[in-house]
Image (spheres, rainbow, N blue to C red):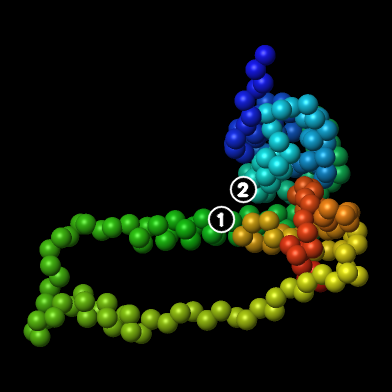
């Protein structure tokens, strides 16, 4: 008997989760906030499932909880759900504020990307040569040279880099940030093991990293 073909991407895994746990996951419509620690619960339920590895399951869960649809569901006072759709703990204000901030930043980046793509698209509406002035030089060319000469890059404020963790900081309960993608995400250390440090993200997902991937969180987290 041939073994089932393994999933190769997050989209297939999320569709599989929505089919297996319809009271918890979905691929369209309103999403439900997930119980903190849902990854461990999933790993236990899918122990004998050969089609999805824990690595792909973890990345798929991160993809799901970073979607606009899911971030919109993180509202203060709403109940998180377990795999069977049963209510768990209520969402705290800190988690709701963080999700709203992530959603706003993600939408702003998407709008900026669309704007950049529109600027880069070729314009072939008028293929005629640009008008020339009395001196014989192209007005468009001179205008471009003028803009090129006066254009300055916007200054960016200097930001103090977050502090690295000392040995005294590496213990359960320490608030940290962990670099999983392009931007660091707030988390809390839950376990310190020989093979790595376990941290829990605000979404409820727990990941294992080394100390170099962690930085102390700011004292003000909203």
x 69%, y 60%: residue: 179
Q: Which mark is residue 68?
A: 2
Q: Quadrant of residue 14?
A: top right
Camera sees residue 22: no
The outermost residue toward the top is 1
CB atoms of marks 2 and 1 within 8 Å = yes
Check disc 1 and report the residue beneath it.
107
Residue 221, percent across and down? 78, 66
Query: Which corner quadrant holds the C terminus?
Result: bottom right
Judge left or right: residue 136 versus residue 71. left
Instruction: Classify 9 as above or below 77.
Output: above
Judge left or right: residue 209 versus residue 11. right
Query: Which corner quadrant holds the N terminus?
Result: top right
Question: Dot 1, how many residues are within 10 Å of its Cα: few (below 14), some (14-19), or many (20+)?
Answer: few
Instruction: Classify 23 as above or below 91.
Output: above
Camera sees residue 181: yes
């Amino acid at each position: 008997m041939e073994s089932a073909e393994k999933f190769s991407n997050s989209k297939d895994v999320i569709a599989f989760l929505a089919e297996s746990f319809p009271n918890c996951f979905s691929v369209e419509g309103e999403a439900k906030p997930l119980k903190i620690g849902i990854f461990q619960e999933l790993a236990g339920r899918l122990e004998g499932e050969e089609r999805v590895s824990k690595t792909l399951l973890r990345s798929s869960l991160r993809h799901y909880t970073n979607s606009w649809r899911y971030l919109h569901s993180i509202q203060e006072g709403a109940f998180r759900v377990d795999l069977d759709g049963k209510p768990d703990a209520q969402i705290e204000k800190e988690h709701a504020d963080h999700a709203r901030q992530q959603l706003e930043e993600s939408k702003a980046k998407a709008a900026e990307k669309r704007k950049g793509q529109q600027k880069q698209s070729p314009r072939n509406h008028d293929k005629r040569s640009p008008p020339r002035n009395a001196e014989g030089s192209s007005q468009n060319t001179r205008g471009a040279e003028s803009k090129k000469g006066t254009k300055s890059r916007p200054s960016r404020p200097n930001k103090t880099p977050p502090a690295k963790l000392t040995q005294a900081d590496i213990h359960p309960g320490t608030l940290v940030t962990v670099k999983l993608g392009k931007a660091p995400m707030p988390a809390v250390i839950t376990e310190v093991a020989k093979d790595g440090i376990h941290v829990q993200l605000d979404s409820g997902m727990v990941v294992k990293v080394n100390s170099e991937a962690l930085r102390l969180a700011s004292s003000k987290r909203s």
